Structures are given as structure tokens and as C-alpha cells.
Image: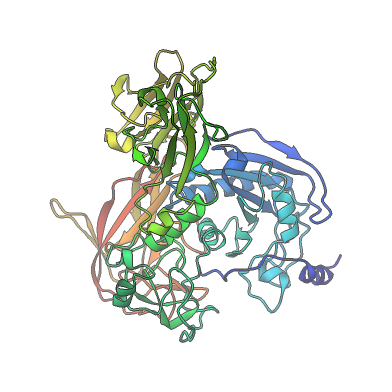
Amino acid sequence: MTSLRRRGVRRGVARLAAACLLAAGLVSTGSSAVGSTAAGEVTGAAVVPVQTTGPADKRFNLVLMGDGYTAAELPRFRADVERHLSMLWSIEPFASYRSYINVWAVELPSNESGVDCDPSLDAPARDTALDMGFWGGCNPDSVQRLLTVDGRKAAAAADLVPGTSSANRQVVALANSSTYGGAGGSYATASGGNALSALITPHEIGHSLGNLQDEYDYYARGVPGGAYAGGEPSSVHHTLLTEQQMRDQRAKWWRWLGEESESGGVIGRHEGGLYSTKGVWRPSRHSIMKTLGYAFDQVEREVMVRAISAKVNLVQDHTPTERPLGADRTVWVDTLHPVGGELAVEWRLDGRPLTTGGARTVDLRTLGLSPGRTYALTATVTDPTPFVRDPAVRGSAALTRTVSWTVNPALGTPEDTTPAAFTGHTATTAPVGARSVVHADTTHPVRRVPAVSWSLDGRPVSNPGNDRDLDLRALRLTPGTHSLTARIAGTDRELRWTVDALAASASYELSPPLRTVRRPGQPVEYVYDGPFTMRLAARDDQDGAVVSQFRVDGDGWYTYYGWPTDAGAPFLFSPSGTVIDDLVYGKLGRSRAVPWDDATPDYGTHTVEYRTVDAAGNVGRAQSFLVTLVRP
């Protein structure tokens, strides 16, 4: 089939509905699924579990699939998957809720390498598994960076992952390309090998999962978006209200106003968004929904916490509720275990709180229940995360679940012989970070509560109340490697983890300055009269990828990715920034995102900080140097 005919067919194929034009314990075995569907015609796919945190039907499943990778290039696809995931786990709230997510890779060997219309409309068409293509699927009326996928084939490939459905998964299709591009919608897409491509994935999941909107002040690159002419936006993170109106009406992001933004600056009212330059406002000067490289701000992060949590159930299992229970037994709930903090469990009997310290099991025999009447017992599981401030979000089914039982002391409970054993736990195959919550669940004998005791480096650790979770942050671990053990009291059942309490080290390399100034007790200062480059490097004593970040003058932490046109090149700072494809990168001082932002050079001295986020989630201590930019 000729290139022209191929493109004609492609325009008739159901494609990804684009939401935006982009601005900017591991398992080693896999299973194969070979087949053909009437809708998608996907064959020869291998489903590889990359991260398994629980049964697929009880988790949010991230399904990554590749297109344009030949059988010989599948190692490149695996490397791209690892790079995208390493970036995702360095960003909140994915870092704290990683334990809610299963990750699957669907390996789809293509007959030819690359994807259609890459980088131009007259580029050869490729015979690939998912028919991905730039220019909106080779549409001359589209734009180059709009990277689409055949939705039927993507769905058919995702359906090969057992236990998943459109309700509990997010598909990300990676193209074997170094050209910048992607799209959001039911199926997110990103180029696999571009310097910025790993940052496209969380942005697109923000669209697809959180229904977050673009904060760009343009629609077509290089063209200011004009004035917003609509009414109050339905978008959670856009408004026409003033800060005082938000406070008075308790509307939009009023609870976060005045706080330092996670993506830099202060949460307030920053003009531009929804593709308009004026007349509409967003919470932060920049965030990942405006400029790739920054974090979700608090407003967006709250939305994403709810969206991720809504895909799972905080209560994973519990004592059956169908019939009344006797008072001669234990009652239990099994919960999820966020990496970033413990869930809270409150037990009530006839509406009165019980003193349990958040334990997951209550022994009814200790409550002195009287025969001749029945009691109502409830367990309410809540996520107390500080990422959420809206009571409506906190009280929603995403973050609060209640289980109810009827207790009748006149009933008896049959004996059981359930042995005490571990049923689920934080993966022991990789080190856990010093900021992690580690968990160990057990069986539930009806006549006793298996107690879990913890020890660190051979010494007992106090962990009253909920002994199924241990928050390592509370232990204030000394830097280094530690051994953590969980044991079921009175048995030889034991789990052991390596705790990585040493963040990856960071270093920098700058282009030659005019001069270097060293003062006692002060960061070293480098003097330039024009552009200069910065290369960041990281080294860790543990396996796994390390993400480097930097910020200028206390602005938001920005992910180091090399340079937009070359991941292997250093980052280039210049007095007014560098325009690449109508976006601006590397302005020293007050940053610019688009050409019409203020280009006035910020001469003088600036503080550059840098740090690392390692595979275990440890965030390195920020280090800094000074750069003085003098007039040429």
C-alpha cells in the first residue's frame, strides 16, 4: 500500500479524541497473549507485569504499550517504560499513591520501526501494530505534535491485561520516536524517546484521569490566545473570581490561597489559561498543566488524589456483613496502604467511638456486651492526607468508606483453625525509602488477633495501635542502609526489608565562567556575561533510576531532562531564554514559557539549587551555587 493510500485509510480510522495540544514489588516474568479481535486486530502481544501491588480488579491499572518498536527494538521500549515510570513516581501524588497502582507493559512488535508522518507529512508510512502517527494521524489540517493511536487497537491490546477494564485502567501508548509529541483523552500518547516525553505522561494522565484542563494561554503555538469571553469555568483550577470573592463565596481554591505553591510562587490568581491570555485566572504561575517540568500545584494535586483513590476501594476486605455476628469473636477490616501515610480507622459501637488506636481488628470479647440486645458496629476508613482540604472530597467514597455489622451476643461463633500468617505486605524485592509507610497484613483467626512486632537493625520499634503499618518517617533514620523486620508474635513468620535511608548524591558541571568567586561559608559563585550551560548528574548506591531537579531563586522545582532537543545535552541558561518550537526554555531569573512573556534579562546574582529523587522515593538535601549575570 502506498504512503498516500495509507494516509487516506488512516483518516477514516477511529482515533484518539485529543484533550489538548501539548505545550510542552517489580515482577520479571510475563505472559503472552496471541489473538485477533474483530474490532482491533491485535496479535502477538506479550503482557508483562511491571509493578504488582495487588489484584488487578482491586487496583488502578496503568497499561503502557509501544508502537513502532520492532522485535529487535523491544529493549528500547522497556527502557522508555522505565524512564517514564521513574519520572511518574517522582511526582506527587503518584509518589504517595504508587501502592494503589499496578503497571503493565504490553509488548507489541511492529513490522517496521517508527510511526507514520514522523516528522513530516511526506515521511514514509510505517507498518506498525497500533497505527500511531504524528499530525493527528497524518492529517494535513492538524499539527505535527498531535500524536494519535488507533483507539480500537489500543483498547484490544489493553483488554489482554487480565482483570482490567476501561473503568479501572489508564492506557498510555508510546511511539518509537524522538520527535516531541503526544495527546490526551481516553488513550494518552507520548513519543517514547524525546527529552521531554517522560513528562508528557503525568500531564496527560492529569487530563484523562483528573479531568484537569490545560493552563496554556494559547491554542496554536506562537499565537497569544486573546481574551476569555465565557462564564465562570467549570474547571476546578480556573476562575473569573477575585481572591476576595473566592474567600467570601468559599469557592474554587480559596482553602489554598496565600500558600507557597508546590510548583513555585504563591497560590493566588495568575492570569491566563484555557487557551486565553487574558480574562481568566489559574492558581499558580506555572504547573505541570501549563509547563512540563514543574509539579502539580496543590489545587491540581487534590484533584488527582481523589481521581486515583476513586479507582480503588480503601477497604479491600472485611469480616462478612451479611449475617449478625456473635460477641465471642474478632471483627476486622483490611485496608489499602498508601506509601505516603497511614489510613485512619475509627470503630464505633452504637455510634460511640471505641478506643482502638486505629487498629484494623476489634476483639468483641473485650467490650463487655450484654446479651438480650443487638449492637451496631461500624468501621470507618479515611485517608487523612494533607493533600486534601475540601471536606466534600475527604468525605467522598474515594477517601472515606464505612463497613457496618450487627452484633448479637446470643449468637455463638464456630471455632476455626486459621493459622497466623502474613497475607500481604510491601514488596521485599527492592529497598524501601526512609519516607515510606511499610505494611504487613495477616490472617484473621476469629478467637485472637495476631500481633505484628517491628524491629529496625535488630532493635524493637514501638508501633502502638495500628501495628499493620509502620511509618518510617517517624523514626528519623540516620543516613545509610538499615534492616527492617516484621514478625507475627509467637510464630516464626517474618518479613525483612532493606531500608534505603541515603538519598542519591548530585553534582553539577557548568560551562567555563568569566570568573569564579569563593567566599568562606558561602556557596561558590560563577560569573557570566551571557548564556551558560548546566549539566546535572546523580549517583546512587542502590539500583534504579534517579530523577534530578533544580530551581532558580526559590521558584518551583523543575525536572532536569537535558535539553528539549537533546536529552544528552546540558540545560542552557540565557538572559532572555531560548525559543524552541514557539516555547521558551532556560531564561535565567524569572522564567518565561511563551515568547510574549517578559524577556527582560534578570542581571545580577541568582541562586540555583539542585537535588535528587531516587528510586526508593528519598528526596536529597538541596545544594546550591550562585550565578551572577553581568551585562555584556
Please identify the quarter of the rendering in which residue 18 is found: bottom right
Chosen colour scheme:
rainbow
The residue most toward the left is 520
Using the image as rendered, state which of residue 247 and residue 156 is in the foreground. Answer: 247
Write the residue at 51% across / 23% down.
Answer: 411
Q: Position of residue 297 (x, y in %)?
A: 39, 62
- Position of the N terminus by quadrant: bottom right
Counting the numbered discs, the total is: 0
Using the image as rendered, state which of residue 451 and residue 256 is in the foreground. Answer: 451
Please identify the quarter of the rendering in which residue 38 is found: bottom right
From the viewer's perspective, is residue 48 above or below residue 206? above
Write the residue at 63% across / 72% down.
Answer: 144
- On the picture, is 249 further left or further right than 214? left
Q: Position of residue 259 (x, y in %)?
A: 28, 63
The residue most toward the front is 372
Task: For residue 415, say whether it is visible.
Answer: yes
Please identify the quarter of the rendering in which residue 457 is found: top left
From the viewer's perspective, is residue 89 above or below residue 152? above
- On the picture, is 220 further left or further right than 289? right
Q: Position of residue 597 (x, y in %)?
A: 39, 79
Using the image as rendered, state which of residue 513 and residue 427 is in the foreground. Answer: 427
- Position of the C terminus by quadrant: bottom left
Task: For residue 503, say whether it is visible.
Answer: no
Q: Position of residue 612 (x, y in %)?
A: 37, 48
